[in-house]
Image (cartoon, rainbow, N blue to C red):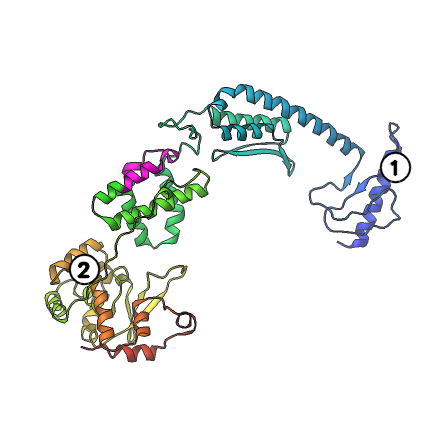
Amino acid sequence: MDPELVREKLRLIVCLTAEIQAMLPDEPPRPHLVLVKDGDYDIGDDLPNVAKPSRAREGFPILWGRHSEKKAVEEKKRGKKTKQRFSKMASSKFQKEISKMPQKLQEKIKKALIREPRYHNRVYEKRATIDGILIVGCSQDAEECQVKFIEQLTKFLSAQRDENGNTHAFHSTTASILFSEFATRWFENVHKIKVTEGTYYDDHSTFWKRVIPVFGDRRLRSITSADCIDLISDLLATGHTRMTEHCDGLLRQVFDYAVNSELIPKNPMNAFKRVKSERENGVPLTKEEEREFLKALDGTKYEMRYVVALYTGVRPCEISSIRIDGEFIVAQNRKQKNQKRIVYKKIPITPMLRPYLPKLREALQNWEALTSHSESFYRDEFRRRCPGQHTPYDLRTTFATRCQECGASEQAVQAWMGHAPNSILAKVYTKLSDGYLLSEGKKVKY
């Protein structure tokens, strides 16, 4: 706004104020402070009874005069009396309930009762977080704000305790939430966004099969560290350490979300160390086992699924995404951390895979049907065909081993496998060309 226009408006306001004050016989005119809502303006010394504003504070009225000052004093006195009256009433009404609570919680409730409401945006608001429960009262009237706050506090204090008799858990809207309800909220609103569809399905199935039958009907706030230790111990007793580690990680994330949502004071899983299963590295097939395996696969329905895994090194979860692009097999890299976009990797068609190209092109026309079964289905199919004690993931280990034996560079093999480079130079500044990858791929022949 033009400073000259603002100056003129202020001059008119002061002149009108002086005329109004002259019409009031009760008290003589008094100086007034004119505050501009936005910006700083040097209004000069020629304006009568006006002080220069240092910085206009947003939300202040343009004119702060005699009547508004008087009203503020009355409002302050009335608020003080209201505060004393309501705090005394609430303390006597809930003295029995408050006395049964821990000392720190008692002090917090008493402080909340005597605290004055906050006036903001023409509304009085009083809020307090007690034992993780947010209690709010708001109104355009200070007394009504106090009444609403007392009503919400009544619901909190008069609620029954949980089934374990804990003094800190009450049947309020948030305190009575069931673990299954909150876990569903976390899976749908948080976990589903961060992981792929397949990972979400596996995590959800495992959690609902192993954890929900134990904690599902329990209130979130009633679950203790001892309960969590008992659950993890029972899962370890089954002998499935990897599955137990999976459930342990998911439980910690659910409880961390509950802590951040102020529903529980701390994560009960933090009372003990994380479960860590021993990782077993894959065992590559020998060349003799590889020949027997390919012979057993010849002509079967899922032959090309395993051939692709053997001669490209793609992960079992990546096989469904492959396609042929010139001299390369392109597949989605499913193990890229902190990547919000889809990342693809390119594996050259090696001399070992080239004889299977006609069969592969034919299979790709119905590839979705060939890769739509569960991992357990393909694992059982693999074990029926493959000699020795191997898993489908060993095909990936076999590919990496053969590439190294044939003299392909480590950088090229890392790119084909979808591994992140170890050095900053390779990770940030090195981009391997297609020609280089193809030349390295031609070495994989045995």
Element at label 2:
loop
Q: CA distance from mark 2 to mark 1?
A: 95 Å
Instruction: Judge whether residue 392 can be spotted in this image.
Output: yes
Q: Quadrant of residue 436?
A: bottom left
Instruction: Judge whether residue 187 can be spotted in this image.
Output: no
Asked if disc 2 and disc 1 are in contact, CB closer than 8 Å, the reply is no
Pair 2/1: label in front: 2
Q: Nearer the viewer, residue 17 or 270?
A: 270
**Circle 2 residue:** 391
Q: Residue at x 32, y 51 (%)?
A: 200
The residue range painted magenta reads: 213-232
Element at label 1:
helix
**Circle 1 residue:** 19
Picture coordinates of residue 15 (x, y %)?
A: 86, 42
Q: Nearer the viewer, residue 143 or 6?
A: 143
Say which amino acid is labelled 1: Glu
Q: Is 185 on the left-hand or right-hand side of 284?
A: right
Q: Residue at x 29, y 44 (%)?
A: 207
Q: Is 367 on the left-hand or right-hand side of 8?
A: left
